[in-house]
Image (tube, rainbow, N blue to C red):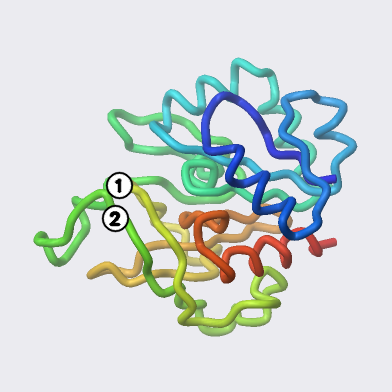
């Protein structure tokens, strides 16, 4: 069973529907026993970093997630991916889960083309980092396929853990991995067939 962590943030219905369409057994929950019994964990997220971290902390699930991700695959999606990092500079400085080294910073500050809009919204090519093509998350997808983004902040100083980027006048971190902990800045559940294939590959991770 795939546990989708419900902490009051994120489009849980869309994600659950995508997993169901793949024939996967998934449950939206904040129950500790169910999360511990799950084979995989997904941490979704939409909104502001500090608010999401506060809500996640309030559920009491932070230590559970930190422990369980040592044993089973965890996937953070969009803001859920950002929460995996050490800290975020979104409207102040806020501590994250510390599961992936790096930090989350304003995208607008680093864009080389100031004419580009922030938030970065829409479809963009996922460029797999050379040498990471064989990662099992990419079992059913290939570099250059398009995925869907909606974000104003992005992960940086995390090159050793970066699996894929997308070009937006700079290489924007699109997917990361540290051990069993994975993250995608884009939304697989909104990325059509490519996203479904990526979710299928995640569900098959041992």
Label 2 vs label 1: CA separation?
6 Å
In terms of secondary structure, where does tag 1 sit? loop
Asked whether, in this view, residue 172 is left or right of residue 85, the answer is left
Residue at 61 percent across and 60 percent down: it is 177
Quadrant of the drawing holding the N terminus? top right
* Residue ID for mark 1: 152
Q: Is residue 206 above or below residue 32?
A: below
Asked if the residues shown at circle 2 and circle 1 are in contact, with their CB atoms under 8 angstroms apart, the answer is yes
* Residue ID for mark 2: 120
Disc 2 crowd rating (10 Å Cα; few below 14, some 14-19, many 20+) is some
Q: Residue furthest top?
A: 58
Residue toward you, 205 or 90: 205
Q: Earlier in the sequence, mark 2 or mark 1?
A: 2
Residue toward you, 27 or 38: 27
Query: Which x, y percent locates residue 10?
Result: 52, 35
- In which image quadrant can residue 7 be found? top right
Query: Which x, y percent locates residue 72?
Result: 81, 50
Residue at 56 percent across and 24 percent down: it is 8
Residue at 51 percent across and 65 percent down: it is 162
Asked whether, in this view, residue 41 is left or right of residue 13, the answer is right
Asked whether, in this view, residue 72 is left or right of residue 174, the answer is right
Disc 1 crowd rating (10 Å Cα; few below 14, some 14-19, many 20+) is some
Quadrant of the drawing holding the C terminus? bottom right
Query: Which x, y percent locates residue 129?
Result: 50, 78
In terms of secondary structure, where does tag 2 sit? strand
Asked whether, in this view, residue 28 is left or right of residue 145, the answer is right
Q: Residue furthest left?
A: 115
- In which image quadrant can residue 91 be found? top left
Residue toward you, 95 or 15: 15
């Amino acid at each position: 069973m795939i546990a989708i962590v419900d902490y009051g943030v994120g489009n849980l219905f869309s994600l659950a529907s995508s997993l169901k369409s793949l024939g996967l057994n998934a449950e939206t929950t904040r129950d500790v026993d169910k999360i511990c019994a799950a084979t995989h964990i997904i941490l979704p997220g939409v909104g502001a970093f500090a608010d999401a971290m506060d809500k996640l902390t309030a559920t009491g699930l932070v230590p559970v997630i930190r422990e369980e991700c040592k044993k089973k695959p965890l996937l953070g999606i969009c803001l859920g991916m950002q929460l995996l990092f050490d800290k975020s500079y979104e409207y102040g400085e806020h501590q994250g889960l510390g599961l992936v080294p790096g930090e989350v910073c304003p995208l607008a500050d680093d864009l080389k083309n100031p004419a580009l809009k922030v938030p970065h919204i829409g479809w963009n090519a996922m460029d797999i980092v050379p040498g990471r093509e064989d990662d099992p998350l990419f079992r059913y997808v290939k570099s250059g396929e398009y995925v869907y983004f909606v974000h104003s902040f992005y992960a940086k100083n995390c090159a050793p853990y970066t699996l894929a980027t997308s070009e937006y006048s700079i290489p924007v971190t699109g997917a990361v991995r540290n051990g069993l902990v994975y993250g995608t800045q884009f939304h697989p559940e909104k990325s059509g067939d490519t996203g479904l294939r990526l979710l299928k590959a995640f569900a098959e991770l041992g």
